[in-house]
Image (cartoon, rainbow, N blue to C red):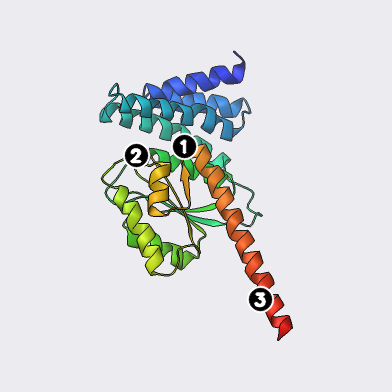
Amino acid sequence: MGKNEEIFEKLRQAVILGETEECAKVTQDAIDAGIDPMKVLTEGMSKAMETVGEKFENKEYFLPEMLLSAEAMYAGLELLLPLLKADETEVKEKIVLGVVEGDIHDIGKNIVKAMLTSAGYEVIDLGVDVPASEFVQKASEEEVGVIAMSTMMTPTLMSIKDVEEQLAKKGLKGKVKTIIGGGTVTEQWKSRIGSDAFGKDASDAVDKVKLLIEEIKTAVKLMEKKRKESTRKK
């Protein structure tokens, strides 16, 4: 086991066991060792929270243990976030992010936020328990290309559907792309309600967002090309 992997393993254990001070210490050790902050996030914290999620599903962990792990992760994430900032000279796309109405589980959302920020996107974080109308209103006001929604609870799956329906009513469906994720969300649910993408985990979500942004850029270029052709014919 190499030095980096030893640090990642210590970090994973600190998060899984909910050891806040240890998580902060090991994160700082990783930073001091010059390890890529994104690797610290993906190989350490994200993998640890995947394990915590599995333990929660298998009833090995309950809400108190899950909250302790989240608190430990946030202690490390606080040290990483300033280092994950993208080059300020880059042109950033805006993304609206939030946990849908009826759910307050924000662990996955916060990991995705950190990874999207490091990838160069401007993330407008609406927080938790976000009404469908707020997602749609903010997307319209800020002229964003993507809405990213999550939930960990089965009853709140309908809240995602509400967002899709309100986008359609406002004439924004297709203009604004949507990606959904979380413990109870599936590819089948995405297809059923008409979302544009499903992220099975934080890394996959970021990859899917990049694809959605590229789709939007391609569509805009195509529309601009048709507009110019139409102008020339006149």
| Mark 1 or 2, nearer chain start | 2
Observer-side mark, 1 or 3, equals 3
Quarter of the image for the N terminus: give it: top right
Residue projecting furthest to the top: 1
| Residue type for callout 1 | Asp
Visible residue check, residue 232: yes
Residue projecting furthest to the right: 232
Relative to residue 128, is residue 73 depicted above or below? Answer: above
Q: Which residue is drawn at 46% across and 45% down?
A: 198
Residue position marked by numbered label 2 in the rendering: 184
Residue position marked by numbered label 1 in the rendering: 201
Is 181 on the left-hand or right-hand side of 86? Answer: left
What is the secondary structure assignment of the residue under circle 3?
helix
User: Can you tell which quarter of the image residue 37 is in?
Assistant: top right
CA distance separating discs 1 and 2: 12 Å
Residue position marked by numbered label 3 in the rendering: 227
User: Can you tell which quarter of the image residue 220 is in?
Assistant: bottom right
Q: Which residue is drawn at 59% across and 56% down?
A: 215
Is 178 on the left-hand or right-hand side of 87? Answer: left
Relative to residue 18, is residue 175 depicted above or below? Answer: below
| Mark 2 or 3, nearer chain start | 2
Relative to residue 195, is residue 176 depicted above or below? Answer: below
Q: Which of 16 and 55 is in front in this view?
A: 55
Is 155 on the left-hand or right-hand side of 97? Answer: left
Q: Position of residue 197 (x, y in %)?
A: 48, 48
Observer-side mark, 1 or 2, equals 2
| Mark 1 or 3, nearer chain start | 1
Q: Which residue is drawn at 49% across and 19% down?
A: 10
Q: Nearer the viewer, residue 40 or 177?
A: 177
